[in-house]
Amino acid sequence: MTSGMRGRTGACVLLVALLLSTLVSLSLGRFSIPLKTVAAILLEPLFDIPAFWSNTEAQVVWAVRFPRVALAAFVGAGLALAGASLQSLFRNPLADPQILGVSSGAALGGVVGILLAGTGWPTICGSFAGGIASLALVFWLAGGTGAGRGSAVMLVLAGLVVGAVGAAGIALVKYAADPDNQLPAIVFWLLGSLAAADKKSLYVTAPPILFSAALILGLRFHLSALAVGEEDARNLGVPVRTVRLLALGAAGLATAAAVAVSGVVGWVGLVVPHLVRLSFGANHRWFFLNTLLGGAGYLILVDTAARTLVAAEIPLGALTALLGAPIFAVLLRRLRGKTDA
Amino acid sequence: MRLGNVVAHTFVQPNLYRRRGTACRAQGFIPFPLRPYRTIHAHTESLGIASLTPTYASFCLQSMKPKQFKCLRCSVAVFFLFSCAAGAALPEGTPVVLIDQNGREVKIPAKVERVATLVIPAASMVLALDQGAGRLVGIHPASRAEIVDGMLGRFFPESKKIRADVAGEGFAPNVEALLASKADLVVQWGDRGDAALSPIVKVGLPVLTLNSAGGGEIAAEWLRILGRGLTGREARGEALAEAFLATKGEIAKSVAQIPESRRPRVVYLYRRQGNAFQVAGGKTTVDSDIRLAGGINPASHLTAYASVSAEQVLAWAPDIVLLGNFDKDLKPALLFESALFASVPAVKDKRVYLYPRGGFRWDPPSQETPLAWRWLFALFHPDAPSAPLRGEIVETYRRLYGHTLNASEIGIIMRMIDNNDSLNYSKKFSH
């Protein structure tokens, strides 16, 4: 099987998996609704089905579960794509919005937004500014993308520094926040959860993530070329500087939009691209699309577990870390094997 | 100097004064003029011996009133029986030993004049015990918010100016601010970790600790302990605590007559963000208040203020929904207008109520908790006989703050406007 065929198969498999996980997630919840009813409620706008369900059931499916599942899909896709593009951009398998400190920078921007103006759009604008600023800082600290073999370590260290600055800033903002109103909102938001998802949060998140996804998918050939090497990419006619800026911006925007609605949900950008690469190869034509589909499906499933296992919400960030850390550990082992050789 | 107090008091060990586990004020031991007393300590400490020099002893004895002298003499006699083996000498010193809620022995000055509190409700309790802001010199920022946004700022306008920088996030003490406030007694949580407490202890400030875990009646114990800490308010603290617990007994008695089947299912919403709600789970004061007032909290198997989805609230199908005072956007109208909640019994029957807020919010424990219990009971069991709440509020406020409420103030406390559409609210509580 050629890598292109493998990639295409991957896209089909992942698309089917995404649809299935969406359906499963929509039919699960603390308020029990029979599967048949859920299906009927979902199909009702398309077909003329006489309503045999209660208004509450329709409300639960459309006003509670649908926004949440859609939001999980957007956040998962955005974080996974951001991770994949950062990995290509930095030619570094360990790049991830959280490890690079971008999530924490975006979180700092978000809490500053809450402090100055409140939740909603100020949060997303602040998150975006914080995300991009910390990405630029990491980029500068690590000495760009062409630092050679040592860059993996440099990048992680730079991310550590930026992440620490973000965490310190968050602590300061929490100190300055009004303990009665702002502080609880900040704490709630930082918990990292999709529990608050409603239609409004969907409107806030979907456009920036769709935009960055389109940008990254549009740049997928250039990014694949960059992943091989800057010189090679230049020889292939890739406008390196422009591509780098656009991709960085897109990754920052996607991360910021994800952070703005879900707080810091880590590891998705690391785990999903690697799983996709392992299962369906890194064919430049399909890799980014597969990452997008995989990321969406992955986070839908994890979030479904977070909201249905017990009555109280399990923090989503905790679950993704629980799943992500072992994979990161395996990666580290592999990387060490390479450096030792 | 404070260390001196502590050293001095190791002689006057509390086993002399502690009766049946409660602290007793050593009022008889305030005879020494302040300056010589302090000098004695510098001196005895530098000598490293636990005795008074003869000169100072005679000076102090001369400056005593006969009654004080008699008291001292008796105490000395008793004291020797207990501690001659330890080689200690004359008892002395002005400080008083209290036992706080964690069983710690706290040595406080004989006359506490400046109190700082990091415990949010303790600020309003000190205002209530003193019926004035004269003694309160430092408070938690959230206490300030409570004073400014609630009623206490109206009753005691000077309380709005009390410095509110003594506590940071997680009740972390700002030790320098505490020292700058010149507090001679600090009130802090005793069950929120050592980091909240030890920095204050280390700089030598006496800290009275309170515990946050427990039902609403825990505030009665706070009143008692704070009353002992505030010189001259012990009896008042005791009386307020008694009245507090009497209400509890009264409510419990009324509730005992109501069969289990007639107890409503009550959910308390603390905060909302989109479709996520924080509800009062088990081990919260609200949970225990609901139970006391004869309700059933379906969320009691969760821990603390747990975050749940709107779906979970639907699944619980509560008969009554209580809205907390902490989220400004959480009002009965929000639920009444939501299509999602339309089928919930509480929303259908318009039994969604916003907690009142007076000298303190009624949802967390405070000196006003007995009123909260009465309010809950009246809402849970509208047909059961209960004393008119308005009268109880007026009486309680007179007792607590020395303030006679007018009708519009009661309206503000009871949230009459926000609760206007809720079942029977204006009818039941308008007189």
Image: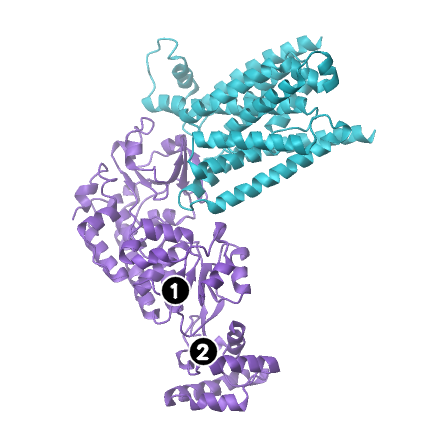
Locate residue A145: give its quadrant: top right
Residue shown at 34% from the left, 33% from the top: B317
Locate residue B368: give its quadrant: bottom left
The spot of residue A93 in percent (x, y) is 69, 26
For label 2, the crowd category at 10 Å Cα-Cα, with few meaning under 14, some 14 to 19 and many 20 or more, is many
Up-down relation of residue A318 to residue B220 (above or below): above
Residue type marked 1: Leu
Q: Which mark is residue B94?
A: 2
Q: Which mark is residue B317?
A: none
Q: At numbered mark 1, what does the secondary structure look like: helix, strand or loop?
A: helix
Q: Is residue A148 left or right of residue B408?
A: right
Asked whether B225 or B78 is in front, the reply is B225
Q: Residue furthest right?
A: A341
> How far apart are labels 2 and 1 at the CA level?
19 Å
Residue type marked 2: Thr
From the rendered image, report the letter of the chain displayed in purple.
B
The spot of residue A252 in percent (x, y) is 57, 26
- Which of the chains bears the disc numbered 1? B
Residue shown at 56% from the left, 14% from the top: A15
The spot of residue B35 in percent (x, y) is 47, 80
Up-down relation of residue A184 to residue A202 (above or below): below
Q: Is residue A64 left or right of residue A90?
A: left
For label 1, the crowd category at 10 Å Cα-Cα, with few meaning under 14, some 14 to 19 and many 20 or more, is many
Q: Which residue is mark 1?
A: B226
Q: Quadrant of the N terminus of chain A?
A: top right
Of the numbered discs 2 and 1, the one sitting upstream in the chain is 2
Up-down relation of residue B143 to residue A21 (above or below): below
